[in-house]
Image (cartoon, rainbow, N blue to C red):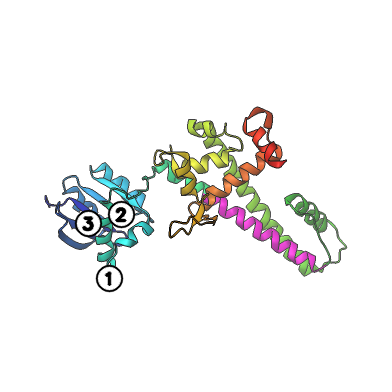
Amino acid sequence: MSEFAVVGVDLGKNVLHVVAMDVGGNIVKRRKYTRPQLFALFRSLPPCLVGMEACASAHYIGRTLTEMGHEARLMPAQYVKPYLRTQKNNFLDAEAICEAVQRPTMRFVPIKTREQLELQAVDRMRDRLVGRRTAVSNQIRGLLVEHGITMRQGRGGLRGVVQELLAQENTALSQAMRTLISGLWAEWQSTDAAVRNLTQELEHLAKKDPACQRLMTVPGGRPLVATAMIAAVADGSAFRRGRDFAAWLGLVPRQMSAGGKTRLGSIIKCGNTYLRRMFIHGARSFKLNGNRSAHRIGDWLDELEQ
C-alpha cells in the first residue's frame, strides 16, 4: 500500500473500480470495491493523488477523500476518454483516469461544497417547475384554441381568460371540458406557487451571501443569476481570466482550423446551459428596463442599438 502514488477510481452506483499506480507508472493494484470498502481502503493509505470523473456522487466522494488527507481531483469525462486504450470496461476506464490525472495540462473540476450543491439543487428544482408550468400553460392554450378561445402571451393573459372562463356559467365549453380545464388550472396554480416559493428562497440566500451581493451589482445580475453562478463556479478561482470563464460557458465560436487557416463557426453553446440562460435573461432584463446612465456599459449598449 505504501507504493500507491496515483489512484484512479471509476465511479458507480454500488461498485467502484480502482486501479493504483506506483511512482514509476506501474499498476500495483486492480480491484473493485463497494463504497464502504473504498472508504476503508483510503483510510489505510498514506496521502496520494486520486483521480475521478466528474459525475454523480463525485463531489461527495472527493470531499470525503480530501478530509482523509488525499488529493482528490475531478475531471470532465470527455477529457479522460483520449487516454482510454483498446476496448472499454470499468478497469480500463480507471486506468485511463490514472493516466489523465497526472497530466500537467489537464483541466480539473473544482470540488463543490455542500452549500454549493444545496444551492444548485434549489436552482434545478425551480428550473424543472418552470418547465412544468410552461407545459401546463401550453396545454391549456392548445385545448382552448380548438374551441375558438384565444389569449395573449404571458401568464397574465392566461390567468385572466381562464379565470373568467371558469367563472361563467354559460360558455361554449361542455361540462366535461370545463372540468378538464379546471383541473389543469389547479395544477398550474400549484406549480406557480411552488416556483414563487423557491424564487423567494433564492432571493433570501442571495441577500445573506456577500459574493452574491457583489455579483448583483453587475448590470443584469439579479438574484437568480448570482445564485446560479455561485452554485456553479463558487469564487471563480478555477479560471485565470474572464475569457476562460466565457469559453467554459460556451460563449466562444467553434473552431475548424487547419492548414494554417483559422475558421470560426457559430457559438459552441457547451457547458452549463442553465447558467448561460440566466445570463441571457439578465442581459435582456437590463436592456429593456435597466438604468443605463448608472453604468458605463449603458453607452456601449446605446451605440450597439444604433
Q: Of label 2 and label 3, which has the lower sequence position?
A: 3
- Between 34 and 241, the one nearer to me in the picture: 241
Q: Closer to us: mark 1 or mark 2?
A: 1
Compared across the picture, whether 231 is left or right of 50 comes to right
Residue wearing tag 3: 37
Q: Secondary structure at mark 1?
A: loop
Q: Position of residue 101 (x, y in %)?
A: 28, 52
Query: Is residue 132 positioned above or below 303 on the image?
Result: below
Say which mark, if any, is on residue 192.
none
Residue wearing tag 2: 52
Label 1 CA crowd tier, 10 Å (few <14, some 14–19, many 20+): few
Q: Of label 3 and label 1, which has the lower sequence position?
A: 3
Name the amino acid type tagged 1: Thr
Residue wearing tag 1: 86
Compared across the picture, whether 164 is left or right of 114 comes to right
**Among all residues in the image, which is located at the extreme top?**
294
Quick check: marks 1 and 2 in contact, CB under 8 Å? no
Whether residue 222 is in magenta: the answer is no
Residue drawn at 77 percent across, 69 percent down = 176
Q: Main structural element of the magenta stretch: helix, strand or loop? A: helix
Name the amino acid type tagged 2: Met
